[in-house]
Image: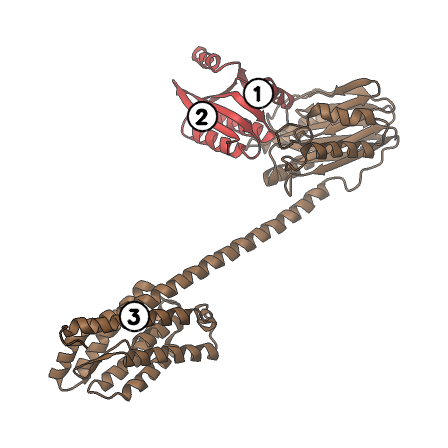
Amino acid sequence: MDPMLPSLISTTIVLFQMMCVIVVFAYLITRTRFFDEVLVRQFTWKNQIFLIVLFGILSIYGSESGISVLGAQINIRDLGPMVAGLVAGPIVGVGAGLIGASYRMTMGGFTLVPCSLATVLAGLLAGMVYILAGRKFPGILIAVSFAIIMEGLHMGLVLLISRPISQAVEVVSDVALPMIAANAAGMFIFSFIIANLLKEKQTQEERDRYHKELERKNAELQIAHEIQTSFLPEAIPRIPGYSLAAMSIPAREVGGDFYDIIPFSGHKTGILIADVSDKGVPAALFMALSRTVVRANAVWHPKARNAIQGANAMISADARSGMFVTLFFGILDNDSRRISYVNAGHNPPLLFREGSSPVPLTPTGIALGAIDDAEYGEESIDLNDGDVLVLYTDGVTEAMDSQNNQFGEERLAEMVSPNLALSAEAILEKVCEGVRVHTGDAPQFDDVTLMILKVGY
Amino acid sequence: MEKILRIDERESGNVTVVSLMGRMDASSSPEAEAGMSRLISSGSRRVVVDMSGLDYISSAGLRVMLASLKKLRNDGGQLVLVGLKPEIRKIFEIAGFHRIFTIYPTADQALHSFDTIV
């Protein structure tokens, strides 16, 4: 020691040199697997013994690195057992304390008993704090406060036990401040590293939980997709004298489009295509409601217009969020080839007839869900042999390429018109192909549903 | 990146004029819906929606307009649409919404209509 420096400053310098050692020690010990296990309360004999020995060694280092003031050691012997107790409970705390205390016993001096006792006590009390904090590390503030109180207690024990009392008072008044400061600083370093480690773990846990949540949601959406698909006809029913093809692809896992083919008694067939506003889960829920309501009304009312009027009254009652559904519902008389229909705000289906331009079956009323007492008109049209009726949702005509150009009705007609001789299935494939070519790499924005009814095969 | 939908708002007397510019589809409609909801809950009862800058509206956009109309009418308010381009008007017409919305060619005419109603 430089004799020119006042003892307070010189001892403080030595103690702060210790801090560097502590930083390295704390860094290394917190990076071990055993420390990780203890932090998540997976206690084994192996990791407890490992921590007892390591923190015991830290305690020995705390004694050994200390400097002597009037025969008393200014030291950070208590730090190891304190940290051990705060992170791993009383057993590890006392274990490390006993190692530190045993070593202290070999060093002698008139403060031997209180100093050894304080080291064991440090581990024990730290373990109590650990339990009181709910069997976890109590955080930086409590840990540092505890270190200050513990070192105060340590000084108290010296005053209580060491004799002669005058010498004890002299030692305590000399070393109390630097010792409390050194242990508090050491504890701060440890706490800071441990708190960071815990935060890191928590962030990781949150990320894992978020990941799991996402997986669960995806799984749920997959199930929802399957349920929704089961709402669509499993197989297209055969209508004698007609060929029929349909497909529906939601933009996301679930969507708001649907179609239905309902066989009625007396050689009649209900043909339905519908599009719920918006897309995704809200649309899918509304689709499930609408599909059931429309089907029930279609089976109940023999006339298309009454069925849709009834369905609208029910759907409107549940459409508070502005949800609505556009649909085309036609009842085809299989034998007379007359189709009576209601178009509730839906994209007009196109009737293609060899040698003439396509005829749109324009709306006869407003979308379902917009107003509860809406009136619907009913139109009818006679189909001829070879006629092709193309029913679609706006996902087809509004399918966009990368320059935001819509597929449009014209392109749709271009896909159908030259192929009227093909089967319904083949025409459907032509249109799909046309949409695919048009959109290219652009993502599918909307649910796409397409149905082709052809008179004949 | 350019925004798909721009929403401007101005007050004209006791009427709020909302201008929608760009494209109102499933991805941009939630923003418009939030804007309209905020407007209505903050007490606006006479709302003019200027669509002269709107290039496209999907069913998601129609839903936002319908929800706003229903909310305003429930609270004794009014919603008027102005400046619909032909392609936008066509979409409203197909759905049959031209029959439930009050539609004027220009914002001035809509504002004037409020004066005469009072």
Amino acid type shown at disc 1? Ile
Q: Which residue is mark 2?
A: B8
Q: Is residue A431 visible?
A: yes
Q: Residue at x 63, y 38 (%)?
A: A443
Label 1 vs 2, first from the N-terminus: 2
Point out the frontmost of discs 3 and 2.
3
Q: Residues within 10 Å of mark 3 (few under 14, many from 20)?
A: some
**Left or right of A299 in this view: B30:** left
- A326 lies above or below A154: above
Specify the colour of chain A. Answer: brown
CB within 8 Å, label 1 to label 3: no
Relative to A190, is B41 on the left or the right? right
Which mark identifies residue B100?
1
Residue annotated with mark 3:
A19
Amino acid at circle 2: Asp
Mark toward the viewer: 1 or 2:
2
Which quadrant of the figure has residue B17?
top left
> Secondary structure under badge 2?
strand
